[in-house]
Amino acid sequence: MATTKIGIIIAREFNERVRKKSFILTTILMPVLMIGLMVAPTLIMRYSKGETRHIAVIDRSDIIAPKLESGEEVIFEETDLDLEEARRDRTDLFGILWIGEDVMTNPSNVKLYTNGSSSIIVEESISGQIADIIEKEKLRAYDIDNLAQILEEVDTKVYMQVFRNDQTSGEGDDKQANSSVVATAAGFVLAMILYMFLLIYGSMVMQSVIEEKNNRVLEVVVSSVSPFQLMLGKILGIASVAVVQVLIWGVLICGVGAFVMPQLIPADMMGSVEAMQAGTLDPAVAGGDIEMVQMLATATDFGFVLQLFVYLLLYVVGGYLLYSAMFAAVGSAVDSVQDAQQLQTPITIPIILSIFVMMAVMKDPNSPLVFWFSLIPFTSPVVMMARIPCGIPTWEIILSLVLLYITFVAMVWLAAKIYRVGIFMYGKKPTFKELYKWVRYKY
């Protein structure tokens, strides 16, 4: 009988939210938005062009100015004016570049006077060109024949293949490590998804409880079901919405990675990608594209992507259940969202803290700090999801999940004691001391 009542509450909460247009739009647009956020910076940098900047050059060394190369962003114009005259009379230009006589021995004796705001790209372009010219002039002083050709021939780039020695099979087949670039990016995106889910869906539970409490709906409902059944049904109902959303995203992204991306990748590149996934790639064949091949091999690995979404689902459910129980307790104890701000601060602090720890994952996914925060249930959903793409031991993930779900059960028991008292309290915002008393009440 109790199970049936909880099921009715779950169905109501699920249907109420899934049928909203906002849920449909978010579910469809979120994957598109995620892809757009990853692609947008590249497109902006590629297609955005600033205005052309004209710079007058006063070169007292007579070495640098003739060798400066103008481009789309900057056009250099030599001038015979002295510095004061140029600064006074050439205000129509973007700026004046002054180069001292001793620039070869004192490279810092270079000054740029601008007639407007500058940019880091322009400044680095100018200083970079001057540095290259000085280096070439210094090398030329050694009077070595064919110096340019020699430098070109000795210029070497090393493309290192990375293998997981701890994941080598018994047959001796080497396990190619996943691309660190893809792993880092995937970990960051997945951790941010967990962060968003915990806050949005947890707050959704709290707001739902507050609204029903203000409408006096709870007083009618608890005449048919116990407060614990009502709270559990509400939590599981909204949890089912989150699960459906993650499943839809997983199907879309796995489908794109398995079927769409291989069609967009050139045939020769795809051959190298498949060879790397099979562990038979000859680095000489991939050449300078080996880093790109490794990235594509990781991104199109169906098993890898599917595994990530399975773990994402487990941590979404566990993390949500843990935090939603606390949010439900807070919602039952207050009469408005404004009153809930103080009480929910201790809840949101671990979530925000996990974002800062997640940044440390990019530096070292196995550091002691990261390891312990990925086991602590209040921070493990975000931190562990940032670590998983890096290829951590499975026992750490299992231990983290066990601790997370055990803590959820304990938190539901604790929150239920606050919930059954709080839903009948009106007109006063309780203190933390009063909440502690509610927990100690015996029923």
Image: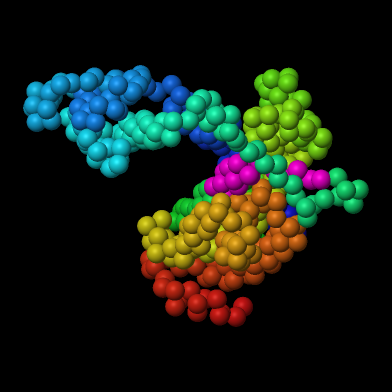
* 71 sits to left or right of 372: left
Residue found 55% across the figure and 76% down from its top: 439
Q: Position of residue 109 (x, y in %)?
A: 24, 40
Residue at screen point 64% across, 35% down? 291
User: 431 left or right of 303?
Assistant: left
Q: Is residue 74 left or right of residue 197?
A: left
Q: Nearer the viewer, residue 342 or 148?
A: 148
Q: How is the image coloured?
A: rainbow
Inspect this view and state whether residue 45 appears.
yes
Total count of labels? 0
**Can the viewer see residue 258 in this picture?**
no
Q: Is residue 31 left or right of residue 52?
A: right
Residue 272 location, x and y as percent?
75, 28
Q: Is residue 165 above or below residue 49?
A: below
Q: Is residue 345 magenta?
A: no
Residue 399, image x, y percentages: 72, 64
* Residue 185 on the magenta segment: yes
Of residues 100 and 258, the one nearer the viewer is: 100
The image shows residue 254, relative to residue 265, as above or below, that is below
Residue at the far right in the pictured view = 171
- Which quadrant holds the N terminus? bottom right
Residue at 77 percent of width and 40 percent of height: 303
**Start-end of magenta stretch:** 174-192
